[in-house]
Amino acid sequence: MSTIQIARWGVAGISVGCAAMYAVAVPHFFRELRDHCVYSECMAFYSTPPGQEWLVAHGITPTVWALAYTLLYVVFSLLYFTAGAALFAKKRNDAIGLLGAFTLINLGSTFIPVMDVLKQHGPFLKLGAQSIAALGMAGFIMFYGMFPNGRFTPRWTGWLLGTIIVLRIPGMLAPGTWIDIQSSFAFFLTWFIVWIGSLLVLVVYRYRVVLSPMERLQTKWAIYGLVVALGGLAGWTAAYLVNKPAWDANPYLLYVLEVGVHGSMCAIPVTLLVALMRFRLWNIDPIVNRTLVYGVLTTCIVVLYGGTVGYLGLMFQTSGSWVVSLVATGLVAVLFHPLRLRLQRVIDRWMYGERGDPVATLTDLGERLAEPMSPEEVLLAVARSVREALRLSYVGISVRVGPGDLDMPIAEDGPVPLEIRYVPLVHRGERVGTLHVPSLPGTSGEIDRGHDGWTASDRRFLDLLSRQASAIVHGVQATYAVQRLAADLQESRERLVLAREEERRRLRHNLHDDLAPRLAALLYTSSAAEHRVDTEPTIAKSMIAELRGHIRRTITDIRTLVYDLRPPALDELGLVGAIGERIADLKVAARGLAPQAGASPLHIELDAPEVLPPLPAAVEVAAYRIATEALVNVTKHAFATRCMVALRVADGKLELTIRDDGVGTAKPMPMEPQSQTRIGGGGLGKASMRERAAELGGFCGIERLAEGGTIVRAWLPYGDADSTERSKTMQPSERDETA
């Protein structure tokens, strides 16, 4: 048999035995009350006996009096037995359900004095009654120490509760002996304080750290029932002790006392049934709130009324005067409403935070944000304000800081719960982030405004705070965007500097490794020819002729180097003329390639304004290079018969378009602006076109047309008039470096 099966049979056996002993004890208890407890105090009943004279004076027989108390106790026990049987039937496979059923059945039979009558009918029944009481006490302590998940957390609490039980059980089995801690008031008081204190600390720790939201709500119900029961027991006991002679002299009041005490104790089985058996628990916070408000209010009214009557009676030396009562009643009536409102506000703030006063919450948040803070500190202040205002255990905020649908967690306040709900933060129709709050029982996913377990006031307050948080998160999002832009700008500047240095290093290598040695060789050749002019004129002439060829090749290399920096045609002919010259050269090449490819000659047209506005040197070079690269690709690879090159200027941008009717490219680059940030796809020429446009803040894309052919488009911003004027006045060396 498994452990749960053994526990089930053990609980069933003990509970049946307890119910059987209770059934045997009820008639004995009734007869004991009727025959012995009416006229004098007896072991089976602890209340003051009414006496024969009082019963005769009020027309009540001993049978009726005994029956009234017996029925009260039987109804009380049946409620506990029924609750225990229901828990056993529905939760027999759950350890905490079995322990709860065992506790309720034992408490229902041992809290009342019915079982005490069995102690007079032999040692066996006496030991049985004492054992059931001891087991009920142990079950009660263990149940609230393990509720609601049936585990000891932390584990050492099991040893602590076990020690508390072991110290008490011997005295319950052998009362009045040296092993009974109740024989020493100081020792028993210490034991009781340790038990109650450890139970409170354990419940608070498990509630705040260990339990899930559903288990927390279950704990609220169980603790609420326990507090109501013990509070009612303490309240009725205090009322009895304050004026004991008056209560003992009136059996009616004693019966009311019994009804009040046992009625208060009925809260335990009711709340435990709700906590363990109802799938979707009701929110108990409003019930606790009203209980606290009216409980404290009732106490204040009683103290106020009693204090007023006593004070006025002493002042005017009167007792029971209707004037004094009238004055006290009027004072209570005047103070009742403002006192209730004040208590309601205090308890609401203690239980719910500042949700009843949104102005105070927003004011506090504004004061926190008045100090200079980083974006992370700003979001942490918002999260803390939301958590404190709603009395939540955890609040987190994530911000949408980049493209896509992913949010980045930025701020968290409080321990992260096991289940989290997500509230979208929307600013002007755009989702800017997410607010993370603890999940509530019975729900999943994002907060459903109609069926989430939140009260209407909670939802209104959460909506208000989320709107305010959305505006703040939007500001933080903008800050992150500026920081990203600054980082991108810094990266671009670094890339430009690196590119410039690489270009300078290339020029240095070309000059040092190629041009300089060649010029040195020319120097040596010219010197040698000079020495042989007189003695060997033929050899000197040959050397001079060779020298002339070397000089021509050197001049060609220097021109190529200069052309790589900036095509001379741009300075001589302008951008339109330079592109036209390049088109003319490519037409010649195309006519030579057409017969080899078996196609018609390529016809290239240029569509450009007669006069372009003054353009920066960098824009001219980029446009010329992009046009040249695109035309070369068309000539070599497109097998096109027609190509159109167009230049347009509008809104401070130069638009360059090259369109052909060829076969297209293998991997066209997308036309969207985002393509400027993606590297890859295509050859070096395509990457060069893209990078040249990106360096100027523009972009270049290639698109394959549905009707056939390919179109290359480049947008190059050339700035305002001031920048172009500055470009016109720049020295050639400066323009070359800029290019």
Image (cartoon, rainbow, N blue to C red):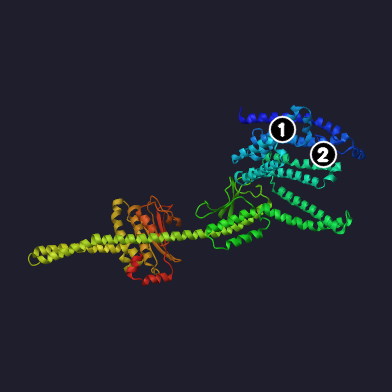
Q: Is residue 734 left or right of residue 206?
A: left
User: What amino acid type should be assigned to the residue bearing mark 2?
Assistant: Ser
With respect to residue 316, does 612 lie above or below? below
> Mark 2, residues whose alpha carbon is within 10 Å: few (<14), some, or many (≥20)?
some
Question: Where residue 504 appears, x then y in whole percent?
Answer: 31, 62
Write the residue at 66% across / 37% down: 167
- Viewer-side label of 1, 2: 1
Left or right: 224 with respect to 385?
A: right
At which x and y percent is residue 55? 90, 38
- Dot 1, how many residues are within 10 Å of its Cα: few (below 14), some (14-19), or many (20+)? some
- Left or right of residue 507: residue 7: right
User: Is 338 above or below relative to 652?
Assistant: above
Vertical relation: 332 (above or below) 220: below
- Whether residue 177 appears in this view of the structure is yes
CA–CA distance in space, label 1 to label 2: 24 Å
To which residue does mark 2 refer?
47
Examine the image and state in which quarter residue 389 appears.
Answer: bottom right
Amino acid on which disc 1 is placed: Ala
Q: Residue at x 61, y 60 (%)?
A: 365
Which quarter of the image is occupied by the C terminus?
bottom left
* Residue 576 seen from this side: no
Q: Secondary structure at mark 2?
A: loop
Query: For the residue labelled by badge 1, is the local secondary structure a helix, a strand or a loop?
Result: loop
| Residue situated in front as seen by the camera: 434 or 269 | 269
Q: Which residue is mark 1?
A: 174
**Residue 45 location, quadrant:** top right
